[in-house]
Image (cartoon, helix red, strand yellow):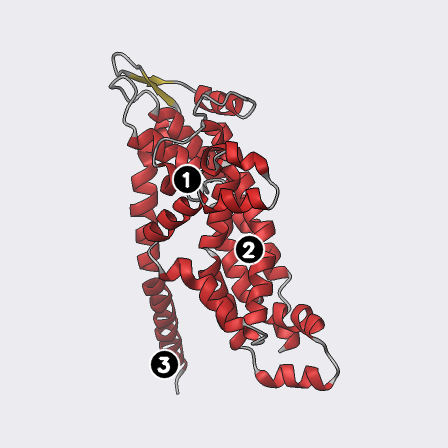
Amino acid sequence: MSLSTVKAEKRKTTLKYYGFITSILLLPAISFFVFYVYVNANSFVLAFQKIDEITGEISYNGLNNFKTLFKSFRSSKDDELLAGISILNSLKMWWINFLVTMPLYLVFSYYIYKKFLASRSLRIIAMLPSIVSTFVYALVYMKFMDNPGPFTEIMERWGFKDFAAKNVFTDYAFENNIFFTIWLSFGTSLLVYTNAMNAIDAEILESARLDGVNDTKEFFSIILPMIWPTLTTMLITGVTSMFTTSGSMMTFYMTSPPTNSVCGFGYYLNIIIKNGTFNGSYSHFPMIAASGLFVMMLTFPVVYFTKWFMYKMDKTEDIA
């Protein structure tokens, strides 16, 4: 075979390789530029503008929208709907959910995977929120937790007399929102983690058992490292909502929260947009745009750091 023929074959192979890569990346690239860059281009510009509440005139506002946002982080007024406070609330919700739910998901998934006592019943109970319509489940939950209702009666019988004078949905709005959100997401997470555990080669676990490995050591030394890719995926997709999560606020309150101090950022945006404009103008839109741009700038490095850290800690190949 001549040198020119070899070079031609090499060029052909290279073109096929890059053609294949291009065909795979083309659609995501188009989607990104159309549905993110193009759609949000006006929002990026609007973040540095202001709209007159009376005339509707648009003018350049520099970084004043961001200054207003940063000032709202330090506000303690419950009667104001503030972007900064809502971002902090979202961050608080996410971390509480993460620190509480991640260990619970993993432990319960392992319990079901090992088929311990009443594991099937536990699976059904945990999956109920996913099987039943969210609207129906929320309605039953609200009837149960309302005051007067079964929950307050149970708490009073246990000695918590102060529940007779309080309502879970108004006096404990933030805590109730977190609890319901955790319970609602339990079924899906159990399904994902249990399926990941079921995919582990049984010979690895049998070999570990022969070496005298107990359940606790099996869970931490074998199960967790083997399902690390699943954990990585769930965590990376989860941190994207770290600054926007709002839980089930819309389910319970629509656009009328008991106090604005419990609103998450996603819920804040829903309230602003769904309740319409202020005095017939769009003067609040630049502030929303600035808040969204700020959240994006915060989320981007967090997601990539999480990805780097989780990949660095991956020990799957060492066990396999």
First in sequence, mark 2 or 1: give its number: 1
* Extreme-top residue of the structure: 54
Res 30 label:
none
Measured as percent of width and height from the top left, residue 34 is found at 29, 46
Residue position marked by numbered label 3 in the rendering: 5
The crowd level at tag 2 (other Cα within 10 Å; few <14, some 14-19, many 20+) is: some
Measured as percent of width and height from the top left, residue 295 is found at 47, 37
The correct choice, above or below, for 262 with respect to 251 in the image is: above
Q: Residue at x 63, y 69 (%)?
A: 225
Residue 166 visible in image: yes
First in sequence, mark 2 or 3: give its number: 3
| Amino acid at circle 2 | Lys
Q: Which residue is drawn at 43% across and 34% down?
A: 293
Give the CA separation, mark 2 to mark 3.
Answer: 44 Å
| Amino acid at circle 3 | Thr
Give the CA separation, mark 3 to mark 1.
Answer: 67 Å
The correct choice, above or below, for 270 with respect to 179 in the image is: above
Corner quadrant of residue 132: bottom left
Residue position marked by numbered label 2 in the rendering: 307
Mark 1 element type = helix
Question: In the drawing, does residue 88 fall left or right of residue 127?
Answer: right
Give the CA separation, mark 2 to mark 1.
Answer: 29 Å
Please state which of residues 59 and 128 is positioned toward the viewer in this rendering: 128
Measured as percent of width and height from the top left, residue 189 is found at 48, 61
Res 249 label:
1
